Image: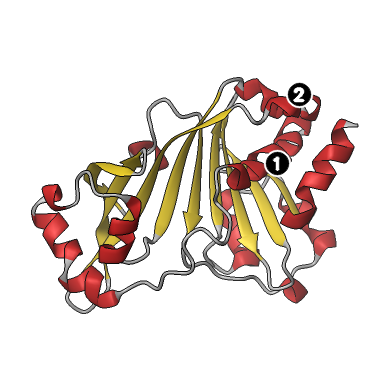
Amino acid sequence: MRIIKNLILPIIILTFLVGCSNSDINSKKPSKEAIEKNTMTKVQNDVNVIMDKDYDYVLKNMGNPYSTVYSLKVDDIDVFKDLEKMKNVENVEVLSKGLVYPKYTSDYKFSGSAIYIGLKDDKVNRVETCDFKNFDISQVKDKNANVAILKYQEYDSLNSQSIDEDSLERYIGEDKSSISNITKHKQCQYSIYADIEENVNIEAYHMEDGQFLIVVFEDNSIEFIDKTNFSNLLSTLEKEMN
């Protein structure tokens, strides 16, 4: 449990080191017309229409993605187990970034699949269809990555008043599905995956009071759950290391 708890801060801090802040692409409004009638259709028919195009071109012609996938390589992944070693956290390489665009039916409902557009050095170098309904990060992340971060463009905020902090610990050890009692199946803002001793999945849910509900899953079991404030993470880490 101590290893799980200690990796929370460093992994979430990575979301800011690689530029996954709220200012990333929120300034651009998604275009339903662009998705339905323009580039989306063209890409489905011929991926060459978007290959080698830059990031801004993709956003301009396809609108904002459903989610952005960051594939990271941490030289010493074991550094995540001990906050005393986190001074090396800057040794993080962003291997690639990918954009997930769901396919839609004629009445603008999800069709069950999506187009994944991968970028390397800000240029599109990979386009493929993936399973949107049962999305698996291993299908699209860089094969050399040991950390992957998904940032969802549209997410739900949880009502902080409805969450009793004193009762959160009772979910530890429960199946992953039990978290829906708190989240009501709402979309988290970040999903973070790390390959350490076991595959670890972290979900960060935005809350209306500005805090985040952090939930750590290991083998579909809840290993850690707590409320925290992203703005205090860096100062908290500094205190932990001193």
Q: Which residue is mark 2?
A: 85
Q: Is residue 27 above or below residue 123?
A: below
What percent of the width, then of the height, locates residue 163?
A: 75, 68
Quarter of the image for residue 113 reads bottom left
Quadrant for the C terminus in the image: top right
Q: Which residue is mark 1?
A: 8
- Could you tell me which residue is drawn at 61 percent across and 71 percent down? 157
In the picture, measured across the screen, residue 109 lies left or right of residue 21, that is left
Viewer-nearest residue: 143 or 30? 30
Amino acid under label 1?
A: Ile
Q: Is residue 215 above or below residue 80?
A: below
Helix, strand or loop at disc 1? helix
- Could you tell me which residue is drawn at 23 percent across and 77 percent down? 33
Viewer-nearest residue: 197 or 24? 24
Helix, strand or loop at disc 2? helix
Return the mark for residue 24: none
- Could you tell me which residue is drawn at 48 percent across and 49 percent down? 150
Q: Is residue 135 visible?
A: no
In the picture, measured across the screen, residue 52 lies left or right of residue 149, that is left
What percent of the width, then of the height, locates residue 147?
A: 52, 34
Q: Residues within 10 Å of mark 1 (few under 14, many from 20)?
A: some
Viewer-nearest residue: 25 or 158? 25
